[in-house]
Image: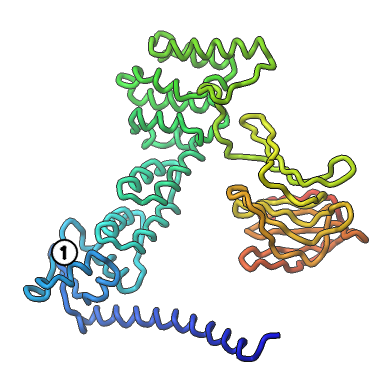
Amino acid sequence: MYSNSTDLKFSNETTKVSLQNKIGAEACNVLMELRNTGQLCDAVIKVDEESFMIHRAILSACSPYFRVLFTNEKFEINRQEVTITDITVDIMRSIIQYAYTQDCCINHNNVKSLLVAADYFNIIGLLRICSEYLISQLNAHNCIGIEKFAQTYFCQELQQVAHRYLMVNFSEVYKVSNEFLQLNVDNVCEIFASDELNVRSEEITFNAIVRWVDHDPGSRVARIGQLLQTMRLGLLSTEYFVEKVKSHEYIKDNTSCKPVVIETLKFLCNLDVEKGLKINQNNHITRPRLPHDILFIFGGWSGNSTTNIIETYDSRADLWVKNTNIKSDYRAYHGTCVLDQLIYIIGGFDGTEYFNSVRCFDPIKQVWSEAAPMYTKRCYISVVVLHSFIYAMGGYDGQVRQNTAERYNKSKNQWSFIQPMHHQRSDASATVLYGK
């Protein structure tokens, strides 16, 4: 049993947090007002012909650069003004606004200049905000440029996210991106050689190579042998390789391509002759790329009992793999869905007990966690995801078939009943169409 003092302490802590937020916002407003009216300002930053009156303590708290500058004894003795070069007036104004309010206006016109300035002044919070903005703007046209930009200014997270966007969406990127056409041969080879490149077939890789060479054939045709060596040519069909690759005008009379063409032809001929030939996944021309789309199977009914086995299917390699490192619990007739890259196993039956429990699997970390249980036990359940909510409908609780339905709010880890269906249903399919 909790004592009254514990309850009071909890209430006080909650109030304290909200007061801190309120006081923080009010303090920012007061400090900005003091700067705008020139009150208590003790230094001036000059950019071009514009002068900004500021409080040294405020900028020093925001930026180690300004802290070193303003705590220098010579600054105190000799002058109250400092001139900043290689920055525009608008960017300096945004820097100062961020120092006072922890906020500033970021758009596609100023984000790169702001990030460069934030890097120069070592303003970590503004760097993070600029990176988050660029991440939100990633698309097939700009992902390569944003990755290179992030690499220049050592924004590791931004670089990783942009690179992953390129790898996952390459099938679209190579078709529309002018940045792709401007890459040098080493950059292009690095992309094509990556196991993480998400292409449903190596035909896409070949088309991308041709498009890149087409942009400047005079200097790039000589590099096509080097590019072909980055492909998984052994994963192409013999017909496609002979008719589209080997006979292509860039390749058929190119001596640099002959070794890889001969190697691939030998492999494909052996594969056609020996239908059961086991593919060596360490061979560079046949090694499958890492799958970006995987089908998971959790538990189910096997023979006369439930099973806890997890299997995955890689459509690119046409291969089922049994996961021996981690298992599900014994469960069948459950519902499954994906929300925010997490897999939810909902309800079900283990041969004896009917479940209202919900388990959550992180396929990247390969760990299980428990989510809030449903109000009703359900197997043969219908499950869908809509607008970041999970809907669980109908099912069988061991006694009767259900017409009730529940909705799961992930942010609150909470289920709630919604309007029941008109009829009892179990073992029914469910899907989403036009937002319904």
* Image-based side of 77 in relation to 416, left or right: left
Question: In the current view of this chain or complex, which residue is farthest to the front?
Answer: 325
Place residue 399 in its image quadrant: bottom right
Measured as percent of width and height from the top left, residue 312 is found at 68, 39
* Image-based side of 360 in relation to 162, left or right: right
Q: On the image, numbered disc 1 is attached to which residue?
A: 47
**Secondary structure under badge 1?**
strand
Measured as percent of width and height from the top left, residue 234 is found at 55, 19
Place residue 9 in its image quadrant: bottom right
**Rendered view: 258 above or below 1:** above
Residue drawn at point x = 12 percent, y = 73 percent = 73
Measured as percent of width and height from the top left, residue 123 is found at 30, 63
* Image-based side of 388 in relation to 108, left or right: right
Q: How many marks?
A: 1
Measured as percent of width and height from the top left, residue 97 is found at 30, 70
Question: In the current view of this chain or complex, which residue is farthest to the right?
Answer: 399
Place residue 51 in its image quadrant: bottom left
How crowded pointer 1 is (Cα within 10 Å; few <14, some 14-19, many 20+) is rated as many
Residue drawn at point x = 79 percent, y = 52 percent = 334
- Front residue of this view, candidates 204 and 356: 356
What amino acid type is highlighted by mark number 1?
Val
